[in-house]
Amino acid sequence: MVHYGPSHLLVMITVYYRDELGAELGGELLGGKYQQSIMDTEVQNGDSTIMLSESESEPFLKGSESAEAPSRRWSFTSLDIRRRFRTLRSWWISSPPVVSHSIVFIITTLFWGFYFLLLPNLSFIPHFLQHSEGNSTIIPGADYFHCGDSIEAAKVRGCEYDILNNHWVPAMCIDEDAIREYQSDESWFGYADQNHTELLDIKTMGETPVYYTNERDHIVHCAMLWRKQFRALMDGRRYLDSIIVDEEHTIHCSKYLIEMSEWGPDFREMPIEVHVGYAGCHMKKELV
């Protein structure tokens, strides 16, 4: 059985209408009644005649004025529209098949190109993008501290770079135990390039807009944050960074790990960008 794709169907439809319209146009021309220009025809509206004033007949650009600028009466009816349409249709019918097929091919290519560009797979979106911006009100009644939007602002506000969160985080929200557990996998090392030829230290990682680790690091990052969330909940911690309380990031990690089963390459050899961000810290009110 032969299977036709969208491009084949569009070409077939184009050829079909090309033949149908050609037959119709040929019949009209053979009828011998093709009306000429009606530029001098008056438009009767009851007992009145619509005419252009002299100013309306002047060119839009003064520099394009001509001694032959029209001052005559004219009208624009549906016949003009039909005539223009027939001219375009005649060009389409008389053009070689390669022209119409090429136009269909270009339109189809553009359509599918936009389709795939506008529907990216979530698993290929770096995890640093899956972070809600307006998360200062996630925990009602809690004080909220944020590291700003620059390294200088983060340092002034007492923030430190957290390699587990890959964000600058207020110092009281840093979980050193979680960071050590995360580092024990040894997949967290950051590099200046995708080929992992230039190793970066932690200080440089925090001061670099973008660095590269690997896909295994992304997996461990998600897993360790879930462990951190659980311990924070069970311990009733007062300080909670804005990453572990962000639902958007949690949903992203869960989808990412589920979709990993569809991948086959060695994740330790797969480079991935890590963009440095600036997080906040929720401080719960003390119980009276």
Image (cartoon, grey):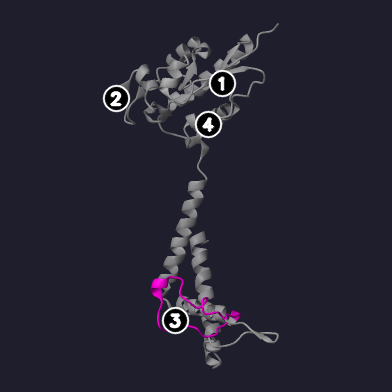
In this rendering, the label closer to the viewer, 3 or 1: 3
The residue that disc 3 covers is 69
What is the three-letter code of the residue carrying label 1?
A: Ile
Mark 3 or mark 1: name the one nearer the start of the chain: 3
Residue located at (63% from left, 17% from top): 142
Does the magenta portion include 61? yes
Circle count:
4
The residue that disc 4 covers is 130
Mark 4 or mark 2: name the one nearer the start of the chain: 4
What is the three-letter code of the residue carrying label 2?
A: Glu
Q: For the residues marked 3 and 2, what is the alpha-carbon distance in whole angstroms?
A: 72 Å
Q: For the residues marked 3 and 1, what is the alpha-carbon distance in whole angstroms?
A: 73 Å
Tell me which segment is drawn in magenta.
52-78
Q: Position of residue 176 (x, y in %)?
A: 48, 10
Residue 274 sits above or below residue 67 on the image: above
The residue that disc 1 covers is 244
Q: Position of residue 170 (x, y in %)?
A: 50, 15
Residue 165 sits above or below residue 19 on the image: above
Q: Position of residue 61 (x, y in %)?
A: 43, 70
In this rendering, the label closer to the viewer, 4 or 3: 3
Dot 4 surroundings within 10 Å: few (below 14), some, or many (20 or more)? some
The residue that disc 2 covers is 198
Q: Secondary structure at mark 3?
A: loop
In this rendering, the label closer to the viewer, 3 or 2: 3
Q: Using the image as rendered, state which of residue 52 and residue 113 is in the foreground.
A: 52
Mark 3 or mark 2: name the one nearer the start of the chain: 3
Q: For the residues marked 1 and 4, what is the alpha-carbon distance in whole angstroms?
A: 12 Å
Q: Position of residue 230 (x, y in %)?
A: 60, 15
Does the magenta portion include 39? no
Q: For the residues marked 4 and 3, what is the alpha-carbon distance in whole angstroms?
A: 63 Å
